[in-house]
């Protein structure tokens, strides 16, 4: 049984320019708070209130607050989609104490259920351990024999050992060592943010990666070609964004800020490319940390990037 905690509808509040003219509506005027069983097409937001993986990985805590903070950032954004475009919010999966694995399993079941309703899951983490629950749900949905391409926008490989325990730094190694039909593409890798052992592990696991210094705004043709090639090799694709990939000047409120991180326009371009592809099933955003944010800058940027993902899913619908 999936345990999803309903959110307080007051989170979805904002400016109201008109109560009848849909062309003047904002997110808070169209969002439908619903049980998963009530979802029907469109996009469905689900939060993952968890930072146990970050704690295990010795990161800075605070990402547990992100799902509701991101909702608040989305609430006031203009809604510029067709009358048939529906956006649901099914609530939050919450990690009970240190029981990360059960929370990930719950998230996986919720993602599978949302996909079965013909909707695209929009998952608001949480630490990047969110990704493993996201993966479990997509894998269950597409079946064990389908090839799955996992695209990650991230400064880090997250390929650490998990012999003792899993964390926010182990998910992709878990997947690649346990699922022969999954492949991994990561864009934004920091040369100074990963040990040589992690680069060696990435090569051993046949990871496709692009360094952040190869991703210059206005010169992304090779990256986009590489993404196209990767996507075409798989039956289904899922997209995850770890916000520590962004330059710390734009995103100070993350667990591990990146002085040499990506420009937001580069991240937006990748989201357009991947989320807009017909093979892409779902999207998650992770590691936004409201407790460490300055003037809400990271939350606002995160909400804008979620909006870009939602727009991409609706455009291809």
Image (cartoon, rainbow, N blue to C red):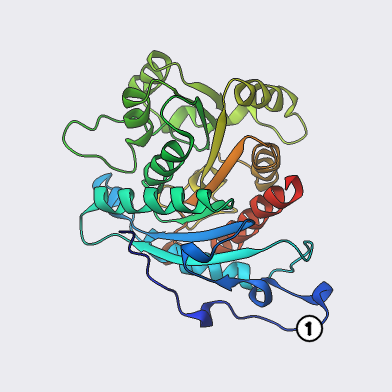
Residue 292 percent coordinates (x, y): 43, 62
* Residue displayed at 32% across by 23% down: 177
Residue 306 percent coordinates (x, y): 61, 55
Q: Using a 10 Å C-alpha cutoff, classify the residue at mark 1 as few (fewer than 14 neighbours), some (14 to 19) or many (20 or more).
A: few
Pick the residue in front: 290 or 184.
Answer: 184
Residue 64 percent coordinates (x, y): 37, 62
Position of residue 14 relative to residue 55, above or below, is below
- Residue located beneath label 1 in the image: 17
Residue 131 lies in what quarter of the image? top left
* Residue displayed at 48% across by 63% down: 37
**In the image, farthest residue toward the left:** 164
Residue 160 percent coordinates (x, y): 30, 31
Pick the residue in front: 284 or 2.
Answer: 2
Position of residue 67 relative to residue 259, above or below, is below
Quarter of the figure with the N terminus: bottom left
* Disc 1 element: loop
């Amino acid at each position: 049984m999936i345990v999803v905690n309903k959110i307080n509808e007051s989170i979805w509040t904002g400016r109201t320019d008109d109560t009848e003219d849909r062309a003047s509506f904002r997110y808070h005027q169209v969002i439908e708070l619903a049980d998963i069983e009530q979802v029907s097409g469109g996009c469905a937001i689900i939060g993952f209130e968890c930072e146990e993986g970050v704690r295990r990985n010795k990161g800075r805590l605070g990402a547990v607050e992100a799902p509701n903070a991101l909702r608040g950032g989305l609430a006031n954004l203009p809604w510029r989609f067709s009358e048939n475009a529906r956006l649901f919010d099914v609530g939050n999966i919450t990690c009970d104490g240190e029981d990360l694995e059960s929370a990930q399993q719950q998230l996986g079941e919720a993602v599978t259920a949302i996909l079965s309703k013909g909707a695209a899951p929009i998952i608001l983490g949480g630490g990047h351990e969110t990704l493993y629950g996201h993966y479990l749900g997509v894998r269950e949905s597409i079946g064990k024999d389908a090839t799955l391409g996992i695209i990650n926008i991230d400064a880090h490989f997250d390929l650490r050992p998990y012999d003792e325990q899993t964390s926010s730094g182990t998910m992709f190694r878990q997947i690649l060592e346990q699922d022969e039909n999954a492949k991994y593409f990561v864009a934004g890798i920091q040369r100074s943010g990963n040990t040589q052992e992690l680069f060696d592990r990435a090569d051993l696991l046949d990871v496709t990666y692009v360094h952040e210094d190869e991703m210059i705004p206005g010169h992304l043709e090779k990256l986009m070609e590489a993404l196209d090639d990767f996507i075409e090799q798989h039956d289904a694709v899922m997209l995850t964004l770890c916000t520590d990939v962004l330059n710390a000047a734009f995103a100070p409120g993350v667990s591990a800020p990146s002085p040499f991180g990506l420009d937001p326009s580069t991240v937006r371009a990748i989201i357009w490319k991947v989320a807009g592809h017909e093979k892409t099933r779902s999207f998650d955003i992770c590691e936004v940390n409201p407790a460490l944010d300055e003037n809400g800058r990271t939350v606002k940027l995160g909400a804008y990037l979620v909006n870009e993902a939602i727009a991409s899913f609706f455009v291809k619908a």
